[in-house]
Image (tube, rainbow, N blue to C red):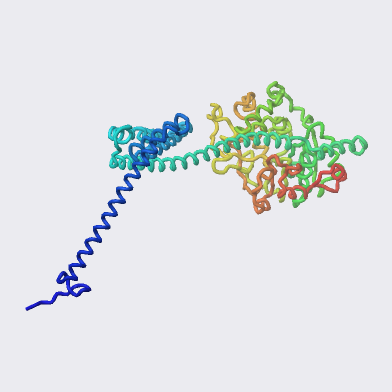
Amino acid sequence: MAVPVRGGRGGSAFGGPNGLRSSFSYRIFVSAVFSLLFLATVSVLFSSRHDSVSLSASSPRLPENTPSEKGYVHHTILALNSDPLKTRVDLIYKQANDHVTLVNAYAAYARKLKLEISRQLRMFDDLAKNFSNLPMKPNYRASLFEPEGAVDEDVLRQFEKEVKDRVKFARLMIAEAKENYDNQMKIQKLKDTIFAVHDLLIKAKKNGVIASSIAAKSIPKSLHCLAMRLVGERIAHPEKYRDEEPESEFEDPSLYHYAIASDNVIAVSVVVNSVVKNAEEPWKHVFHIVTNRMLVAAMKVWFRMRPVQGGAHVEVKAVEDFSFLNSSYVPLLRQLESAKLQKPDLPNEAENANKDISSIKSRNPGELSMLNHLRFYLPEMYPKLHKILYLDDDVVVQKDLTGLWNIDMAGKVNGAVETCFGSFHRYSQYLNFSHPLIKERFNPKACAWAYGMNLFDLDAWRREKCTEEYHYWQNLNGDQTLWKSGTLPPGLITFYSSTKSLDKSWHVLGLGYNPSISMDEINHAAVIHYSGNMKPWLDVALNQYKNLWTKYVDNDMEFVQMCNFGL
């Protein structure tokens, strides 16, 4: 049986004349296409060779260059003459050399800064050596960098891969190092700034200590004016200010006696006024005021012109009126006569102000004056009294103080408010515990107390012979090896085991230096103390506390107005 076969467009596949003709035409077409492609390839090859020959022939006519440029051009032309892959070798080699230079630069910078990154330094050095040694490998040198011979493309790929790996690693290292160096430079600049600011701070402290000391211890123009006006008043009217006979109340032990030693007329008047205005029975209060010879007249004239209200009694004396206070009896006076203490050396102390700012205060003549040390002679100054309340001239009394006389002193001599908290205001801060005598007799952690408001039991004082104790230690401290000058250190020693701690509400300190005292604490205090250099009668006083003092100033007094206190 015949099976029909389906063909192309002619109706059969090789089955008839039409199929054979179609197959033959297709083969001719394919052969023609391949022939054309072959001719085109041969033409391109001959054209490339002709261009290379022409370039080679024209190369001697290139312009002159610098030696490096000439070498590079010559090397490039040789590469073109020998093999086009030489160009890639040149570019890769140049990239490697550039990174060697960059790596070496950062390594040198790291050494200059003396950073503690020796590992990174070693890595930089190793990386630079790897870059330099890479072209020197025998297989690379022979296949890529010898002028004769063809470039092996496989070797070139391997070389390029190694260079790229090293370049990548170098860039990572450089990026990290750059960030570190930038931070290091910022840190160094910050350190330099801190050191510069620290030096300025030290200088500012020194200048501040000197300035505050001058401001606190010098006499303001208004105070000088007031004293001169009062003395002038006495000279103009001597009959009005003749000395009177002492009042019997001055020696009456049943009354409330106060001792104030000061050369500041306006400050003493404020203390007396504040006590009297807050006393329930002011006529029972007696004030014993001691000043120096220059101001005793001014002090007496003030209290004659402005008598204390409520019938309180005021006695004014000069230090010189107590004849027993002489250099044969008082160790301090003997020491003041020595050459060491006659010339306080403020500039040298100021140089060390950042180490011991209190040293300037300790060298202040006021701290070494007899007026300031009268507190150690109260039993002899007032032999008929049993108790006396000692007040500094920079305090203000806000409540009736007669309750102090009712406190059971339990045989103690000194009633005072303790000032220690934590490790502050301990004996170790006031005494030299490197000295064997101090170390043997006292506890460095013992709590210090404050002068400014102190109730002294004069009978217990005489019994314990505290003045003799004070003399003993003051004689030992002639060279100031036990403590610096001042009254608190010898007071801590003299009354070491004979001090009665009082409630803190009796005496609040710090209004002359601490702006952070709460008003609630101040309002509940019986006595507020402007301890520090910012005294309330000075322009540098803390404004938030100043009105607590100025309200007791007698502004109606004509000389206060004339001297322009500016209160």
Residue 487, quarter of picture: top right
Q: Nearer the viewer, residue 360 or 405?
A: 360
Q: Position of residue 250 (x, y in %)?
A: 78, 40
Residue furthest to the left in view is 1
Q: In terms of depth relative to the viewer, which is nearer, 12 or 470? A: 12
Q: Residue at x 26, y 57 (%)?
A: 32
How many numbered circles are shown?
Answer: 0
Name the residue rendered at 17%, 75% in the picture: 6
| Residue 464 visible to the viewer | no
Task: Please give left or right for residue 56 compared with residue 312 in the image.
Answer: left
- Residue 374, quarter of the rendered image: top right
Query: Image check: 28 left or right of 187?
Result: left
Image x and y of residue 133, in percent: 34, 32
**Is residue 444 shown above or below 272?**
above
Relative to 185, is 392 on the left or the right?
right
On the rendered image, what quadrant is the N terminus found in? bottom left
- Quadrant assignment, res 243: top right
Q: Is residue 326 above or below residue 242?
A: above
Q: Residue furthest top?
A: 339
On the image, the x and y values in percent for residue 49 come to 34, 41
Q: Is residue 525 visible?
A: yes
Provide residue 513's location: percent of width, then percent of height.
67, 43
